[in-house]
């Protein structure tokens, strides 16, 4: 087992990893930018090193500075968290070439799955359903029009090398397809330094269902059931839950088996998430693989009792999985709400600033993953997340009631937040009935 781990991230996820390491008897080395200097959570690390100015491009994305900090800190492994360099295959390769274990999948698997066109082809080979669309990259208008004619409008233009809603355009006719093709490629180039885009059939009002997996280097792989992440705005998740409501047990099992087939075909190890779209007729289609720990991983932890961060570390250290598939049970219901410093009434514009008052909810079944405190300043340079509020109860109805109570207790002053919107979502009949889809938030609010 590792003695010291460097955490190549910040904020909530950095603190989450520190806590897991502390319980495992592992020392931690933190890195921080000038914007995060003096943050309280850094005091919980054994050592902390500044790696550059506030912009991520000059700090948290600087591989050479992170590797230097790892060497000075004398660590055996680096945990990338999520975001920043977490899905960067080159960083994973650089870490291992420097004899520092990367707590994540092999760079070869990341390369296969990081390019969505290649991932779709791999899914086909593993007999996993994919959305009808182009066989590869689409580089010209004529090819795009031919694909659209074959699969039928509407279609979605997607960046091959990214995610998070960037490089995506919906087209319902030829004109929109032509203009969207150029716009998506430009956005993809800017965001991911990869202008490649592909086209797939747009599934109307789908559900977003994802499967949590774990795999070790000894040939063992398991799934930890599914999460529903359909409550979104601008392709960014707001509410996640497990189990997925109103999803037949047979379909749950089928989707989870499909996820495992794909992971095994990719030679994947460590934690990851296989994402699917599910239509109204319960047809499911592979969307992408997130080759890292997810923001919403606590939802799975609550219903399975498995600490995913600890499992990541054990797998990276070469240990075999301690769990067999037959031992993984999903019990009760868990819901996570992301509390962001954003203004839902103003197109979710970010609201950086200082938190002048903070009251966190508590009580039975309530978990808070957060690094903020009164006086903490939300930086304009990074993600606007304030906290993840997670509840766990024996049933979905009880979990909703618990979450609504917790949201009423949650007070943040000094910045605008998404708490009010979360209350509206949880109170809405459609959500309570489990009749969810990815367009619900934009369509309703």
Image (cartoon, grey):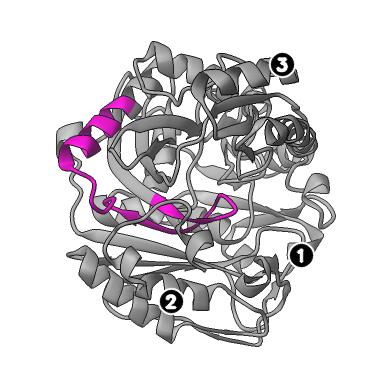
The correct choice, above or below, for 360 with respect to 5 in the image is below
- Give the CA separation, mark 3 to mark 1: 41 Å
Nearer the N terminus, badge 3 or badge 1? 3
Query: What residue do we see at 83% from left, 51% from top?
Result: 52
Label 1 sits on residue: 380
Residue 238 in the figure: left or right of residue 436:
right
Pointers 1 and 2 in contact (C-beta within 8 Å) = no
Query: What residue do we see at 64% from left, 46% from top?
Result: 8
Percent of width and height locating residue 347: 67, 66
Query: What residue do we see at 72% from left, 30% from top?
Result: 181
Residue 390 in view, yes or no: yes
Nearer the N terminus, badge 2 or badge 3? 3
- Give the CA separation, mark 2 to mark 3: 46 Å
Pointers 3 and 1 in contact (C-beta within 8 Å) = no
Percent of width and height locating residue 239: 43, 60
Residue 340 in the figure: left or right of residue 404:
right
Quadrant in the picture for the N terminus: top left
What residue span does the magenta drawing correspond to? 229-258
Query: What residue do we see at 50% from left, 61% from top?
Result: 443
Nearer the N terminus, badge 1 or badge 2? 1
Secondary structure of residue under mark 1? loop
Numbered disc in front, either 1 or 2: 2
Residue 58 in the figure: left or right of residue 366:
right
Is residue 238 highlighted in magenta?
yes
- Give the CA separation, mark 1 to mark 2: 25 Å
The correct choice, above or below, for 29 with respect to 156 in the image is below
Label 2 sits on residue: 423
Percent of width and height locating residue 170: 61, 39
Label 3 sits on residue: 142
**Number of numbered discs overlaid on the protein picture:** 3
The residue lying toward the viewer, choosing from 181 and 268, is 181
């Amino acid at each position: 087992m590792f003695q010291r781990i460097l955490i190549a991230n910040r904020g909530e996820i950095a603190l989450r990893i520190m806590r897991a390491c502390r319980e495992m008897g592992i020392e931690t080395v933190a890195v921080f930018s000038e914007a995060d200097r003096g943050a309280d959570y850094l005091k919980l690390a054994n050592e902390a090193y500044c790696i550059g100015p506030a912009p991520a491009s000059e700090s948290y994305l600087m591989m050479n500075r992170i590797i230097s900090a790892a060497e000075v800190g004398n660590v055996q492994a680096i945990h990338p968290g999520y975001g920043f360099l977490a899905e960067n295959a080159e960083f994973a390769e650089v870490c291992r070439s420097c004899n520092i274990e990367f707590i994540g999948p092999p760079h070869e698997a990341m390369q296969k799955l990081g390019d969505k066109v290649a991932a779709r082809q791999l899914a086909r080979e593993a007999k996993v359903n994919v959305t009808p669309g182009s066989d590869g990259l689409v580089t010209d208008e004529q090819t795009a029009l031919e694909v659209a004619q074959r699969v039928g409008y509407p279609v979605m233009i997607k960046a091959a090398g990214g995610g998070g809603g960037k490089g995506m355009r919906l087209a319902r006719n030829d004109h929109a397809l032509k203009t969207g093709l150029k716009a998506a490629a430009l956005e993809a180039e800017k965001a991911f330094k990869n202008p490649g885009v592909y086209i797939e059939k747009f599934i109307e009002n789908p559900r977003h269902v994802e499967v949590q997996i774990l795999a070790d280097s000894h040939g063992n792989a398991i799934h930890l059931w599914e999460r529903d992440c359909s409550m979104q705005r601008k392709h960014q998740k707001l509410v996640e839950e497990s189990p997925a409501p109103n999803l037949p047990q047979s379909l749950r099992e089928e989707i989870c088996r499909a996820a495992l087939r794909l992971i095994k075909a990719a030679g994947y190890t460590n934690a990851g998430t296989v994402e699917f779209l599910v239509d109204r007729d319960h047809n499911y289609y592979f969307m992408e693989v997130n080759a890292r720990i997810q923001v919403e991983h606590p939802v799975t932890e609550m219903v399975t009792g498995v600490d995913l961060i600890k499992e990541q570390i054990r797998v990276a250290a070469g240990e075999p999985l301690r769990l067999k598939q037959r031992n993984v049970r999903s019990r009760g219901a868990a819901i996570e709400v992301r509390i962001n410093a954003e203004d839902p009434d103003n197109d979710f514009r970010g609201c950086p600033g200082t938190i002048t008052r903070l009251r966190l909810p508590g009580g039975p079944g309530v978990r808070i993953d957060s690094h903020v405190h009164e006086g903490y300043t939300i930086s304009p340079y990074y993600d606007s997340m304030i906290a993840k509020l997670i509840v766990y109860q024996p049933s979905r109805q009880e979990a909703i009631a618990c979450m609504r109570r917790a949201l009423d207790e949650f007070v943040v002053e000094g910045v605008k937040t998404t708490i009010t919107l979360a209350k509206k979502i949880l109170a809405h009949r459609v959500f309570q009935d489990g009749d969810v889809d990815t367009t619900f938030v934009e369509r309703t609010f």
